[in-house]
Amino acid sequence: MGYLWIAGAVVSVAAVVLLVVQHRRRRSFLPPTLVGSIGAFALVAGWMFAVDATAPKHEAIKTGGLAGGAVIALYALWLNDRRRRTDEARHELDSERQVLENVRAEHDRSRVADERFARSVELLGHEAEQVRVGAMHALAGLARSRPEYAQTVLDVLCAYLRRPFLAGDEAKDEREFEVRLTAQRLITELLPHDEAADAPRYDLDLTRAYLEYFDISHRQVNNLMLRAARLHQSNSFHHTTVHGSAWFTDSCSTGRLYLHDMAFHGKAWFSRFLVPAGERVDFSRTRFLGPTKFAGARFDGPVDFGGATFTRSIDFEGTRFTRSLDLRPVEPPVARTIGMYVSTGHENHLPDGWVVEAGTGLVRS
């Protein structure tokens, strides 16, 4: 039986050599594993016979078989581990491929969106009003499907409303007016509702814009810029929340203006604001939570601040109210009233302690 032990050792060494050769050639390790299993069987069984010649043969064979089986089991474990790593590598490769496909698809969508945006902006200069209306709807659709375009689309629509509209004789092109109404309506639709939580905040730059029947009531905006704007007929901002600041500086309203139940979280600038048409301006229950300025403004219609809230000082320097004024906010305001005038021929309600100089209407707070 000593020969069996020697043969097993030789076979085991041969298995190792064969294993190295197969590894270098990147071939299957099954042949050296089988050889190694046979060698392990012969080596262990022969060793047991050499150590104890009286040992039962079946025990030696059993132990040798366990050794040979262990080699096969180790190979199976290694093979399973290699398969697992191969699957993991394949899964990782598939994931990377999917990410790459997603990036490529997003790039394609962005490219298509850019082309769609550029084409729509180009069509805003088309002579036919129906083409301009279609371009505006295309821009609004793009803003809804691609939210990152929303602010840009709003800027474009606001820029359209800043285009010259009325001629020297104030004659109105009705077809162009319908296009402008479309732009106004789409601006409103793109703004989040006032009750929407964590909604995006968009700026509106309507500087020098001509607005007629503009209505962004019950909406949210960030900054609202209406410098030198012309407001005609009826315009509604009531129940609108302005998270940033609002500028109505040098604007003119010749129609009904609804500013009640608003919330100005930042500046509310109405310097040199002009209302010459005698229409009522309603600020009732509006909350002015930041610096507020009406310096140099003139109101030729009734003005209502009843139930309004002022958390900062108000600047009424040089402001003129030629009709009735209701200035009864929730709390008596701190105000700068140098050069402020009210009409002595109309009913006025001013905070306690404010005095109107008879004959001139000069207000002293």
Image (cartoon, rainbow, N blue to C red):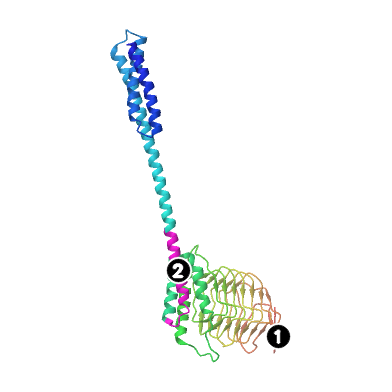
Up-down: is 32 above or below 263? above
Q: Residue at the location (39% across, 48% down)?
A: 94
Residue found farthest to the left: 58
Q: Residue at the location (46% across, 67% down)?
A: 114
In the image: residue 276, left or right of residue 153: right
Q: Residue at the location (38% across, 38% down)?
A: 84
Residue found farthest to the bottom: 169
Mark 1: secondary structure: loop
Label the magenta part by its dominant secondary structure. helix
Does residue 113 belong to the magenta stretch? yes
* Quadrant in which the N terminus is drawn: top left
In the image: residue 253, left or right of residue 15: right
Q: Nearer the viewer, mark 1 or mark 2?
A: 2
* Quadrant in which the C terminus is drawn: bottom right
The label number, if any, that marks residue 115 in the structure image: 2
* Amino acid identity at mark 2: Glu
Q: Nearer the viewer, residue 65 or 5?
A: 5
In the image: residue 278, left or right of residue 4: right
Q: Which residues, given as a range, are shown in magenta?
A: 105-129
Earlier-in-chain disc, 1 versus 2: 2
Q: Quadrant of residue 306?
A: bottom right
Mark 2: secondary structure: helix
Q: Nearer the viewer, residue 207 or 106?
A: 106
User: Which residue in the protein does label 1 denote?
Assistant: 357
